[in-house]
């Protein structure tokens, strides 16, 4: 025979399980990108802040404007060839780029104050295919407050900053792939 307090506890337990299951389903729909940003230690911007605009030359001497990528999720990475953590994360950035480049995503890797020949040789050695830009005087890095490298900014389709990652990341991890899947789902083009 079940005692009254055991029956109340059972009903309470079933109710609690129901609430927790519904909460996790709701959170997974609403905050999925937040979960992946947390797992990658990406700092979220709480206010809508427009990404500072810029025009830089790429390693082939062509002008590139941030505005040219409006409508895409942009991973904006500040780095240098002499920075070991920067070099370590670049192959994973290439994998991320390859996976999502045809889905409304791009990477803009901004080299901070180095010679274009050195940067071009480095990118060719690693077979990097994403756009590599040259911030020869450090102006763009200063606009973004990129005083430590590597530092990466995520920019949404409308040109607003989403988040900031200080230090290297494994951009080819499952968490990173899931983050960009979620960010691209919110794309106006999808």
Image (cartoon, rainbow, N blue to C red):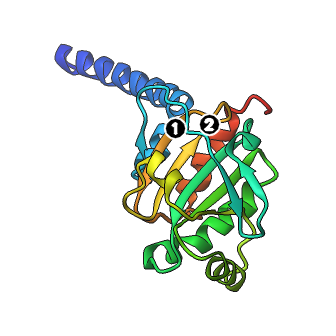
Q: Is residue 80 left or right of residue 166?
A: right
Lower position in the chain sequence, tag 2 or tag 1: 2
Residue 53: x, y in percent? 61, 40
Residue 162's disc is: 1
Residue 126 in sight? yes
Q: Residue at x 55, y 37 (%)?
A: 51
Residue 129: x, y in percent? 75, 69
Quadrant location of the N terminus? top left
Indicate the secondary structure of the residue bearing disc 1.
strand
Q: Residue at x 62, y 45 (%)?
A: 54
Q: Is residue 67 left or right of residue 114?
A: right
Q: According to the image, label 2 marks what residue?
A: 156
Residue 28: x, y in percent? 52, 33
The front one of 171 and 153 is 153
The front one of 131 and 73 is 131
Q: Residues within 10 Å of mark 2 (few under 14, many from 20)?
A: many
Marks 2 and 1 sit apart, C-alpha to C-alpha, by 6 Å
The front one of 109 and 93 is 109
Residue 49's disc is: none
Quadrant location of the C terminus? top right
Q: Farthest residue toward the front?
A: 137
In the figure, residue 93 lies in which quadrant? bottom right
Compared with residue 172, is residue 183 higher up or lower down, i.e. above or below? above
In the figure, residue 160 lies in which quadrant? top right
Residue 37: x, y in percent? 46, 45
Indicate the secondary structure of the residue bearing disc 2.
loop
Compared with residue 91, is residue 174 higher up or lower down, i.e. above or below? above
In the rendered structure, are the residues bearing label 2 and label 1 in contact, judged by CB atoms less than 8 Å apart?
A: yes
Q: Residues within 10 Å of mark 1 (few under 14, many from 20)?
A: many
């Amino acid at each position: 025979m079940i005692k009254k307090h055991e029956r109340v506890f059972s009903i309470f337990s079933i109710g609690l399980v129901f609430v927790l299951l519904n909460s996790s389903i709701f959170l997974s729909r609403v905050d999925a990108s937040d979960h992946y940003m947390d797992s990658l230690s990406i700092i979220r911007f709480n206010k809508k802040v427009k990404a500072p605009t810029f025009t830089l030359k790429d390693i082939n001497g062509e002008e590139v404007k941030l505005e040219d990528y409006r409508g895409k999720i942009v991973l904006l990475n500040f780095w240098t060839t002499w920075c070991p953590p920067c070099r370590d994360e670049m192959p994973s950035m290439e994998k991320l780029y390859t996976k999502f480049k045809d889905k409304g995503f791009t990477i803009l890797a901004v080299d901070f104050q180095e010679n274009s020949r050195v940067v071009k040789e480095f990118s060719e050695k690693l077979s990097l295919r994403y756009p590599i830009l040259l911030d020869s005087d450090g102006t763009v890095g200063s606009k973004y407050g990129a005083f430590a490298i590597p530092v990466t900014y995520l920019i949404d389709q409308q040109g607003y900053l989403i988040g900031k990652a200080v230090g290297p990341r494994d951009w080819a991890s499952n968490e990173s792939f899931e983050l960009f899947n979620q960010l691209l789902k919110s794309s106006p083009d999808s």
